[in-house]
Image (tube, coloured by chain):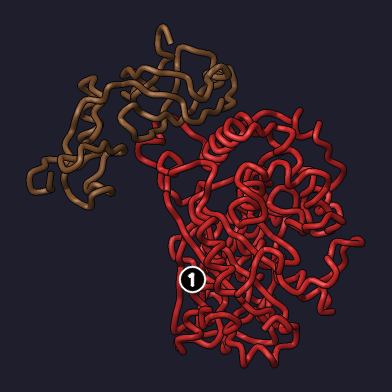
Chain colours: A red, B brown
Amino acid sequence: MSSLRGKAACIGLASAGIGEAPGFNSMELMVEASHKAMKDAGLGPKDIDAVFAATAVHAMPAMSLAEHLGIHPKFSDGNNIGGSSFMAHALTAAMAIEAGIIDTALIAYGSNQRSAGGFKSVSEPMPYEADYQPRMPLTAYALASSRYMHEFGATREDLAEVAVAARAWANLNPEAFAQGPLTHEDVLSARMISTPLSKLDCCLVTDGAAAIIITKADRAKDAPKTPVYLLGAGMEHQHRMISAMPDLTRTAAIGSGKRAFAMAGMTTSDIDVLQLYDAFTINTILFLEDLGYCAKGEGKDFIKNGRITPGGSLPVNTNGGGLSCIHPGMYGLFVTIEAIRQIRASAGDDEGPRADGGWVPETKISLAHGNGGVLSSQVTTIWGHPDSL
Amino acid sequence: MSTKNMSQGPEAQFHEYLQEGRFMIQRSKTDGRYVFYPRMVNPHTNEDDLEWVEASGEAIVYATTTTSRRPEQGGNYNVALVDLAEGPRMMARVVDVDPDDVAIGMKLKARIGDINGKPVVLFAPKEGA
């Protein structure tokens, strides 16, 4: 078992500008979330000695963020591997804490993409792909969906189950952007974007910022809120371009998940709630398979009969996910925050109102899985209540 | 192949071949295995052992999507991943067929065409297949 298990904990978190935040730029939203996260942890800028940040629109966001907040970090990291960057930041922060380099890290993200006119990215066009006019990242996930359906006999109805379950969770969460009833028929009849994916197979386009504070285990005990410990983390990526992905139905989450579970000393049955980066409906199915919840090709059946909906046996994407809660371009830090908040809510911290079942009772262990690029970078993290140490 | 013997990198070379109407891919001088996209270093052998060879143009559809686009902007179009007979996979467009009729496993033949005036490798359903 790795020495990193339980060596770092999240003691503060916040979001800002979720949904729509017209009039604010991405950095301002990130600063607001960071400020609120420090307050949540009972800390100020002088207590932060490391800054991690990644966005889709800034070249050097860690420096900008530190400057805004008056932090002079002795370590910073702008690692950008897409939407899973923030899970990678948590792993790096734990490594730096264990190495004695830092004590307390701020990890942050911000985006005003919805108010600014839609998805934007500093990402360069991919050579050998761009000439064919793919609409990235959408095209990549549509291609993966087509392959999955071909290999395993899955249908658009199977994919729709993921969207319907996500909306059911969103309907319990007043913070979720998309609310109201959603049926399989709604998903199937929505405007086709890139076959087999309709508009309702695709994530939201929202604004939003998020931040978490990670500190070393012995400091975490004194935090005002329940400290939530990083028990396991693992990562892997195999490709940058979808045309270079070895097998479109098998993601690097197979490797990242194994490493995270090994570090935590746990198996799938130890996890109370699962947060899986659902940029598109196919993601949830692939990650349930690749993280070991069911065999390859069985995910489409595994999610049937309400298994991942509220009241089902496996709570998945309990905030409503990227499909129905929030997706400001890079969603990973919101995945992480939901995983941690479920544990804090069970421990009695005030995480705000949700309808019955929206906070899953007796949550002690949660998994936050990040995906970046085009099913490219996969980073799995496992978080636990102090009792899990 | 090493930079000291090359007048340009693999990407520029690939596009120059396309301008000449040729679909060229790389092959390892060490083990004969093919590589696409064009690289400086062979990821299979970790050697700079790649030479250019003419692709056969034979391929099958590995994954496919119809991208929605307004009729006035040109209408729907296909984006596919195709497996070349030589082994490597590439992104491509399947043409001469309704995008919705492009099926995984469909046999294809390459030709040089253009998209927005730029030469590219296109694929059409193989005759008689």
Based on the displayed image, in which of its 4 quarters is residue B72 positioned?
A: top right
Q: Is residue A131 rendered to the left or right of residue A326?
A: left
Is the residue A169 above or below the residue B31 in the image?
Answer: below
- Residue at (74, 33) in percent of width and height: A157
Query: Is residue B86 visible in the rendered structure shown here?
Result: yes
Q: Which residue is more in the foreground, B113 or B32?
A: B32
- Residue at (45, 31) in percent of width and height: B81
**Can you name the residue that lies furthest to the right here?**
A356
Point out residue B57 in the picture as x, y percentages from the top left corner: 31, 21
At label 1, counting other C-alpha atoms closer than 10 Å, the crowd grade (few under 14, some 14-19, many 20 or more) is: many
Is the residue A288 above or below the residue A190 in the image?
Answer: below
Quadrant where the C terminus of chain A sits is bottom right
Residue assigned mark 1:
A62
- Determine whether the residue tagged by mark 1 lies in a helix, strand or loop: helix
Point out residue A51 in the picture as x, y percentages from the top left corner: 51, 76
Residue type marked 1: Ala
Q: Is residue B62 rendered to the left or right of residue A289?
A: left
Give me the chain letter of mark 1.
Answer: A
Q: Which residue is more in the foreground, A12 or A144?
A: A144
- Residue at (66, 46) in percent of width and height: A285
- Residue at (25, 32) in percent of width and height: B25
Point out residue A328 in the picture as x, y percentages from the top left corner: 63, 54
Q: Is residue B30 rendered to the left or right of residue A134?
A: left
Point out residue B109 in the picture as x, y percentages from the top left corner: 36, 17
